Amino acid sequence: MTRTAVLICPGRGTYNKAELGYLSRFHGDKADLLAGFDAQRVDRGQETVTALDGADRFSMARFSRGDVASPLIYASALADAQSLAEDIEVVAVTGNSMGWYIALAAAGALSDQAGFEVVNTMGGLMQSQLIGGQLVYPCQSEDWQLDLVAKAELLSKVDEINQRAEHDLSLSIDLGGMLVLAGNEAGLSAFEKTVPVLQERFPMRLPNHAAFHTKLQEPVAAEGRARLSADLFRQPVKPMIDGRGQIWWPGANTVEALWSYTLGTQVVEPYDFTRAVQVAAREFAPDLFIITGPGTTLGGAVAQSLVQINWCGLSGKADFKARQADNPVVISMGDAEQRKVVTP
């Protein structure tokens, strides 16, 4: 019996100490795929993906860099997408932030190698320019009840700070019950001083992250378009849901429009991952939401996005945990046990 699934690709921050060796652990059978990625890195004078994955130790300063994290995450996620059991039918693909680039390859809009070129190029540009930064702050209760009033107040504070002279701050990613904010140092610091500390860790700065999905990235977007031709892109084989919740149906849009969104709009405007997940749920009604590795941190945001629309009666964290224990609907391939549910 076929199981339908929406495939979800992760973004930055998902290849951490626990993920070191992910490719060798799970994808020893994909030497040809990885060799192509390694060849691109060698041509640019960069350390290969397999060498990075095989490092003796993990260093946050090294592995959180855009030119290191991005290719590792892409290789891990795409290899996972190509490892699903035969009874799983992927009905749509989406991703979070950088995960959009991976989704393009998983859905066929970029070849495996073209997708790596896009990710490696954009990751390198982000790192070399490193414009601004990001932080995370919750707008929900600990039982995953979205506080719409608190969310509106937080976004109002963001707007007010952004109006100050020499302060840049705006929404970067709507991430389930979390807001990812991005801006320059003045804007981020002003927000940190204005809000209470929650759960002893928020607001939380994200190391080596730039002000993704904001106007501050316009120079990066322009350089990306200059280096990456629309010829790299093609029509997707699977429907894709982007960072606005728009569905890109196979054959329904031009390749030029997809290139323009990917290396323009998507880079400089907020990314609504919450909406992408909710559109995927409502439009495709899958049996499973499969999150490729590496890492398992995106599972919470997917679950929170589903709880917000009461998907299949899920009304909170307790409901979701009970459902997962009985008949899991969100599968993180970065979790060794959950991985067994969707791989041969």
Image (spheres, rainbow, N blue to C red):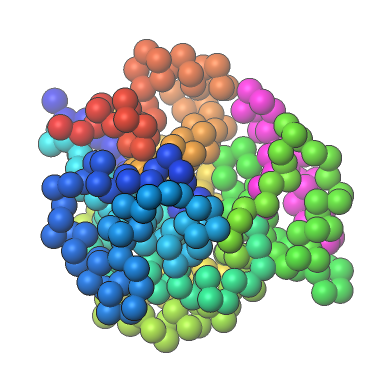
152 drawn magenta: yes
Quadrant of the image containing the N terminus: top left
**First to last magenta residue range:** 135-162
Asked if residue 273 can be seen in this view, the reply is: yes
Residue at (42% x, 86% y) in the render: 226
Residue 344 screen position, x and y as percent: 15, 32
216 sits left or right of 292 in the view:
right
Q: Quadrant of residue 44?
A: bottom left
Residue at (77% x, 47% y) in the render: 154
Residue 237 screen position, x and y as percent: 21, 57
Residue 231 screen position, x and y as percent: 26, 80
Residue at (51% x, 17% y) in the render: 319
130 sits left or right of 198 in the view:
left
Asked if residue 234 can be seen in this view, the reply is: no
Residue 21 screen position, x and y as percent: 32, 46
Residue at (13% x, 60% y) in the render: 32
Q: Quadrant of residue 141?
A: top right
18 drawn magenta: no
